[in-house]
Image: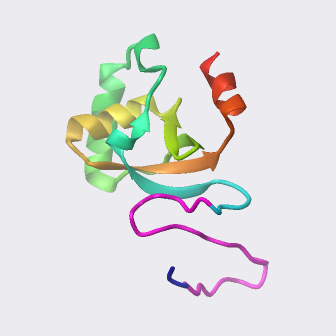
Amino acid sequence: MASFYIQAPSIVKSFALSASFNGTPSTTQQGGPIVLELPLDKIRRPLMRTRANDPQKVKELMDSIQEIGLQVPIDVLEVDGAYYGFSGCHRYEAHQRLGLPTIRCKIRRGTKDTLRHHLR
């Protein structure tokens, strides 16, 4: 694992960042969410068929992503090494339609009970 040193203003106390080079968050993650690029095909979308995305919004996001990149990562829940996406439907579809292999995700770890709660 590589070490990174970041010079920050003295108001910033301390923080830890843990990630592996294969795009998978460390299983030893402590604390809050981390932001990483994940392959689109590794994100399960269990609620994908519950509603249709607005085609105009997807098109606008595609244009924006091509011009300036994705500005807000999608939220992903990691449970036992599997990734579940319940939001960011338009951003996810825009990435798919652009043929991009990965998407920036804010990943938080959860339990199977947390996953069941999201599936209700």
Residue at 49% from the left image edge and 49% from the top image edge: 105
Is residue 38 magenta-colored? no
Examine the rendered structure and indicate whether residue 91 appears above or below residue 81: above
Residue at 55% from the left image edge and 50% from the top image edge: 106
Q: Pinpoint residue 7: horizontal percent, then vertical percent.
A: 62, 87
Q: Pinpoint residue 113: horizontal percent, then vertical percent.
A: 71, 29
Q: Pinpoint residue 100: horizontal percent, then vertical percent.
A: 25, 47
How many numbered badges does the structure rendering display?
Answer: 0
Examine the rendered structure and indicate whether residue 42 appears above or below residue 88: below
Is residue 22 magenta-colored? yes
Q: Is residue 24 left or right of residue 27?
A: left
Is residue 51 among the parts visible in the rendering? no
Is residue 62 among the parts visible in the rendering? yes
Residue at 50% from the left image edge and 83% from the top image edge: 2
Q: Is residue 108 left or right of residue 45?
A: right
Q: Pinpoint residue 4: horizontal percent, then vertical percent.
A: 55, 84
- Frontmost residue, 23 versus 34: 23
Range of residues picked out in magenta = 4-27
Q: Is residue 61 left or right of residue 28?
A: left
In which quarter of the view is residue 96 placed? top left
- Frontmost residue, 23 versus 4: 23
